[in-house]
Amino acid sequence: MERKTKVHAEKGKQELVIAREFDLPLELLFKAYVDPDIVGQWMGTNVLKLENKKHGSYQFETRDDQGKVVFRANGAIHEVVPNQRITRTFEMENAPFDVQLEFLVFERLTDSTSKLNIHIIYKSVALRDQQLQLPFAQGINMAHNRLEEIVRQLK
């Protein structure tokens, strides 16, 4: 089955470009990235903080059945323009990856469809390539599939 979320990594560059078209209106797609309850559902994590404003921040955390933290991520939010873009950093705690810079651009295609373009910049080509050695593309595609399924129910 073809992945709907496309991940493009140009050789020798320290960036990724990710694109996905959704069968969702632009406003609902954007809401899926700024509403803590919806983010937690499609990401499968607890949203501890999500301040969608300039100089805001966020923190996500997932625990196993014994209560042990198995995933924690955080970042600074630099810009939020409703239904247009989010600029933020992303850092996984206790992982061998440095902070990355993410530019999320939301685009209206029709009244009922939209597109998300994500441009991620890494500190080095080696770090970007290390990320790509993980099942990154598969994981983001699965997360976007969940996002679309969950948010479709909000229509």
Image (cartoon, rainbow, N blue to C red):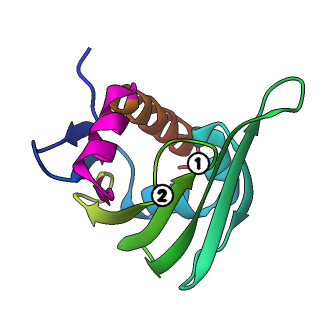
- Going from N to C along the chain, the mark reached first, 1 or 2, is 2
The residue lying at 85 percent from left, 23 percent from top is 65
- For residue 45, which quarter of the picture? top right
Q: Is residue 10 above or below residue 83?
A: above
The residue singled out by tag 2 in the image is 28
Identify which residue, 142 or 110, lies in the foreground.
Answer: 142
Image quarter in which the N terminus is found: top left
- Stretch of the chain drawn in magenta: 115-135
| Crowding at mark 1 (Cα within 10 Å: few <14, some 14-19, many 20+) | few
The answer to whether residue 69 is visible is: yes
Asked if disc 1 and disc 2 are in contact, CB closer than 8 Å, the reply is yes
The answer to whether residue 17 is visible is: no
Relative placement, left or right, of 104 versus 11 is right
From the top left corner, tell me how far across and down residue 87 is, in percent: 41, 72
From the top left corner, tell me how far across and down residue 144 is, in percent: 43, 38
Q: Secondary structure at mark 2?
A: helix
The residue singled out by tag 1 in the image is 154
Q: Secondary structure at mark 1?
A: loop
Q: Is residue 106 magenta?
A: no
From the top left corner, tell me how far across and down residue 36 is, in percent: 68, 58
**Amino acid on which the number 2 mark rests in the picture:** Leu
Residue extending furthest toward the top: 1
Q: Which mark is residue 62?
A: none
The residue lying at 52 percent from left, 74 percent from top is 77
Instruction: Using the numbered discs, state the Cα–Cα distance from disc 1 to disc 2 in whole angstroms.
Output: 8 Å
